[in-house]
Amino acid sequence: MTDPRALRNAFGVLPTGVAVVSLFDEAGKPTGVTVGSFASLSLDPALCLFSLGKAQASARLFTVGVPFVVNVLPHELSDVAWQFAKPLEDKCEGVALSDTVVDAPRLRDGIAHFACHGHAIHDGGDHIIVVGQIEDFDHRDGEALVFYRGGMHRPAPL
């Protein structure tokens, strides 16, 4: 039997990008969740993916067709990443939001955003794998926040 903590620590030796996926809940209230598994999937068609634990409260919000925005955060916003990682009543409190071409909010201070519609949801053991069809995107200069060995970090200089 695999020791989950040991496996998590082994995965932790590889830095990953940190993103906040934002959307509206069933009541129309903006919310979101921090993910460390965001990746490009396809350029044609334009697809991206992330995984999310099935036990997370926001996992139920992701279905085929649901609009969401993947927000890549600059390293200065580690506090925002931690805020969206916690089970808070109002995850967007104090966070500046903007409208997008899909019916989902984006974090105004991100360095990139990908406005999507849910394209497919796949089973991934104790996670779901969410594939998004990218409808719009943008980016600006900045150093992306990374997750490494259980903490948020600034990328190492080249």
Image: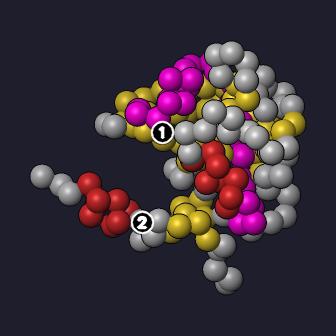
Q: Name the quadrant containing residue 90.
A: top right
Q: Residues within 10 Å of mark 2 (few under 14, many from 20)?
A: some
Q: Which residue is mark 2?
A: 12
Quadrant in the picture for the C terminus = bottom right
Horizontally, is 69 left or right of 16 in the view? Answer: right
Magenta-highlighted residues? 54-77
Horizontally, is 4 left or right of 53 in the view? Answer: left
**Where residue 57 sits: x, y (%)?**
50, 30
Q: Is residue 48 visible?
A: no
| Secondary element at image label 1 | strand
Q: Is residue 152 magenta?
A: no
Q: Residue at x 34, y 37 (%)?
A: 126
Amino acid at the residue labelled 2:
Gly
Figure disc tally: 2
Please, is residue 98 above or below residue 1 in the view? above
Q: Residue at x 45, y 69 (%)?
A: 149
**Outermost residue to the top:** 27
Q: Which mark is residue 120?
A: none
| Secondary element at image label 2 | loop
**Where residue 134 sits: x, y (%)?**
70, 34
Of the numbered discs 2 and 1, the one sitting upstream in the chain is 2
Q: Name the quadrant containing residue 47.
A: top right
Q: Name the quadrant containing residue 64.
A: top right
Q: Is residue 68 magenta?
A: yes
**Where residue 6 sits: x, y (%)?**
27, 64
Q: Residue at x 18, y 55 (%)?
A: 2
Q: Is residue 95 visible?
A: yes
The foreground one among 99 and 76 is: 76
Amino acid at the residue labelled 1:
Leu
Q: Which residue is mark 1?
A: 52
**Outermost residue to the left:** 1
